[in-house]
Amino acid sequence: MDQLASQGVNFVNATSCSPVCAPYRASLLTGKYQSSHGLVINELRLSPNHKCFGHVLTDHNYQTAYIGKWHLWANELGNHHRVQNAFVPPGPYRLGFDGHWAGYNFNHNSYNASYFSDTCQPIPYKDYEPDSQTEIAIQFIKDACLKDAPFALFLSWGPPHDPWHTENVPAEYADIFKDIDIPLRPNYSAEQDPHADAWGNMGEGYANKLKDNMRGYYAQTANIDWNLGKIMKAIDQLGIAEDTILVFTSDHGEMFGSHGRRAKNIFYEESCHVPFLLSWSEENFTKSTIDICLNTPDIMPTILSLMNLPIPSEVEGNDLSHSIYGRSGFEPDAALLQSMGTTAAWQNGTEWRALRDKRYTYATYRKNGKECLFNNIEDPYQLTNLASNPSSKNQLKYYRDMLAERMRNLNDTFENCCWYRDHWTVDRNIIQGAKGGSHDLGVLTDIISQHYSPDVLAK
């Protein structure tokens, strides 16, 4: 990762607009915010009616590949290993990735794991999941280089993700950290954040296993670093580095007890501040550190612009490619962050909206109107909430007005979580009985019947 940052551009203010797995992915692939793509919590199915990243690539004759975690298909909480939840059938719900497919909806156990191709028969990984996925990716790159067409590969590693125990990471990486005393962050709090949902709640005994969990996290991250290096080496050895845009980024971070929370789905830096590293031919840009406020919906239009491909008119993100070339151009005032509710369940009470710019984070909760304002330069651990400081009155008004305008432009009316379950069905496809949208039920039934055997359907 350090090498990639040194040889390319490093967006030091990259922000996850929705720092939770599935909503982030939907924003990445549609270039839209949660309030438009409709995937407001995990375990929903993204509508195929959006013009997505994969559609543009396929329409322009790119060889596409998607490898790894998808998390935009299953609409059932739990039962992740059931074939009907794990297998994304070929067709519109692959969102334009019509080429090589070695994916699964999601699974966080990285040993004895499987993926799917174009049938509902699971294919076991040979080894530790990220290692196997990397080998599949390298083989795709080698094969793609033999064909007279450009390629676009999305490699979606699952780790770092809990479970963090040593059985979920190769021993050689667990050994690196087994005797390391990793210090808790200065903003660690044993007092539970009252705004956290069930996934963010630390629970009883959390502190007792925290450092072991952190060691597992770092071990998994070290393995991802090694696998990224293998991808970079393969690209160099194939002689295609000068013609290849390589991006490394992430959907969210991990709280590990900071501010009395675990997991993600929150506007604090540990959760939403993500890496975004991009490498390409030195002829195309100058190595640099870029502090522009890059947000998740900006990724699709920015990369498509670098590739000289059209940006769909419905995209809400900004083309920030000029910053990579070192040119002047539009620069967002701040990144907008949205959380429509809990991580993966229909439950009210934890909704928030936020803005993050080069210096400050401003956030407000729907439930009680609590506001937060942090100076991330002077207070990187966000220990001091300036919202209660009279001297911040003008600053608060500035961000309140900006947030109101951004939400108004997106028609984001800051509803509670269950409102989306009960009322919003136009821009999404969620099949869960009377309370969910079912406008694409006929299409889905046709797709399933083509790829599931009668005995699987009966189960």
Image (cartoon, rainbow, N blue to C red):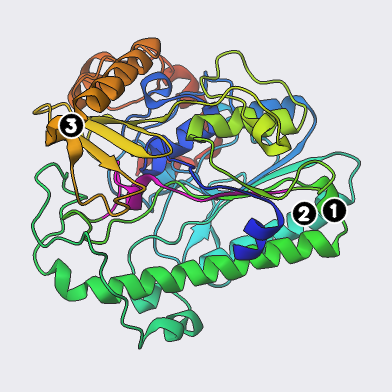
Q: State the count of labels.
A: 3
Mark 2 or 1, closer to the camera:
1
- In the image, residue 209 sits, relative to residue 459, either above or below, namely below
Task: Choose the circle earlier in sequence order: 2 or 1.
Answer: 2
Identify the residue at image location x=53%, y=71%. Answer: 223
Determine crowd level at label 2: few under 14, some 14-19, many 20+ residues with C-alpha closer than 10 A. Answer: many
Label 2 sits on a secondary structure element that is helix
Question: Is residue 121 found left or right of 260 in the rendered image?
Answer: right
Question: Is residue 305 found left or right of 447 in the rendered image?
Answer: right
- In the image, residue 1 sits, relative to residue 36, either above or below, namely below
Q: Amino acid at mark 3?
A: Ser
Label 1 sits on a secondary structure element that is loop
Mark 2 or 3, closer to the camera:
3
- Quadrant of the drawing holding the C terminus: top left
Q: CA distance from mark 3 to mark 1?
A: 55 Å
Q: Nearer the viewer, residue 171 or 403?
A: 403
Q: Which residues are magenta?
A: 263-279
Question: Is residue 50 found left or right of 216 in the rendered image?
Answer: right
Task: Choose the circle earlier in sequence order: 3 or 1.
Answer: 1
Identify the residue at image location x=86%, y=39%. Answer: 149
Marks 2 and 1 close (CB-CB < 8 Å): yes
Name the spot of residue 366 as percent of width and height, x first.
16, 26
Name the spot of residue 196 as percent of width and height, x first.
16, 45
Q: Is residue 244 magenta?
A: no
Q: Amino acid at mark 1?
A: Ile
Task: Choose the circle earlier in sequence order: 2 or 3.
Answer: 2
Residue identified by numbered label 2: 141
Q: Residue 263 lies in what quarter of the image?
A: bottom left
Q: CA distance from mark 2 to mark 1?
A: 10 Å
Q: CA distance from mark 2 to mark 3?
A: 56 Å
Label of residue 391 in the image: 3
Residue identified by numbered label 1: 240
